[in-house]
Image: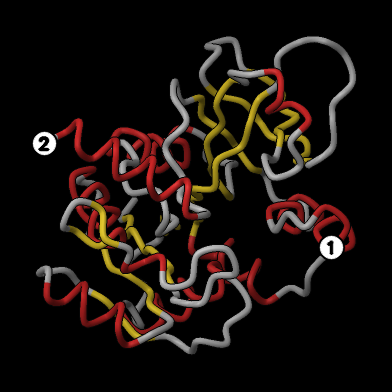
Amino acid sequence: MNPIVLIPARMAATRLPGKPLADIEGTPMIVRVLRQAEAAGIGPVAVAAGDQEIVDAVIAAGGRAVLTDPDLPSGSDRILAALKTLDPDGHHDVVINLQGDIPFIAPSVVKATADLLDVHPDCDVSTVMVAQARPDERTNPDIPKVVAAMQPDGRSARALYFTRSVLYGDQPVWLHHGIYGYRRTALERFCAAPPSPLEKLERLEQLRALEMGMQIWVTVIDEAPISVDNPSDLERARAHARTLS
């Protein structure tokens, strides 16, 4: 495999406009994500930016960024556009799509996402999940759940479905976190297809891949990374950063 890590980012956000450049103890959030991805050491890293301000901030920090059409409909479309600019000859056969709002993502999680594609030749898309930590997470529609066929190792599973609904029973559930690894051919097929019925019903992009017959494999992570979606999340990220200094 020859992976590349791409981080889609744009300034427009309903709950926290301009969040890629939100300051976290002196460092823009997108730069913190970039640094974590670089620390994974699995391949080159670049930001797929929807705005020139993001490109400028990344380059000022010594990183690599490419400007993409701000009107692209999703992060997946944004990374494919960046991939075509950065690697038109197709040298990179695996693409890691790392969200730009998880500033403390562990480098080991980035690597584990890539490793699933290496371990499972039938895997088209890889992602991660974490065990439910609180009862309210089970009923929160903002936290997608994974229905998965767990492997004997207890650390990996084949995804059967993703849902925002409350799952039946009283057993702890698996919660999905949106870092994806794509085989390049799978990413190209995925972006060429229209949104699927289940994707539109659940508002979960990964269901398009399942409806297309792709296999999604999931690796277990031990702790949910901080995801910055609103001002209170940003304050939590800043507080966490202070503990690291």
Q: Residues within 10 Å of mark 1 (few under 14, many from 20)?
A: few
Question: Image quadrant for the C terminus?
Answer: top left
| Helix, strand or loop for disc 2 | loop
- In the rendered image, residue 154, in percent from the top left (x then y), is placed at 55, 12
Q: Amino acid at mark 1?
A: Lys
Q: Nearer the viewer, residue 55 or 76?
A: 55
- Calculate the distance from the C-alpha at mark 2 to the C-alpha at mark 1: 43 Å
Q: Nearer the viewer, residue 21 or 128?
A: 21
| Disc number for residue 200 | 1
- In the rendered image, residue 150, in percent from the top left (x then y), is placed at 65, 19
Q: Residue at x 39, y 40 (%)?
A: 236
- Residue 48 is left or right of residue 218, and the answer is left
Q: Residues within 10 Å of mark 2 (few under 14, many from 20)?
A: few
Q: Residue at x 70, y 18 (%)?
A: 135
Q: Amino acid at mark 2?
A: Ser
| Disc number for residue 87 | none
- Residue 207 is left or right of residue 107, and the answer is right
Residue 23 against residue 177 in the figure, above or below = below
| Helix, strand or loop for disc 1 | helix
- In the rendered image, residue 207, in percent from the top left (x then y), is placed at 76, 52
- Mark 2 — residue? 245
Q: Earlier in the sequence, mark 2 or mark 1?
A: 1
- Residue 211 is left or right of residue 77, and the answer is right
Of marks 2 and 1, the one in the foreground: 2
- Check the image and tell me how it is coloured: secondary structure
Q: Residue at x 39, y 37 (%)?
A: 115
Residue 203 falls in image quadrant: bottom right
Residue 198 falls in image quadrant: bottom right
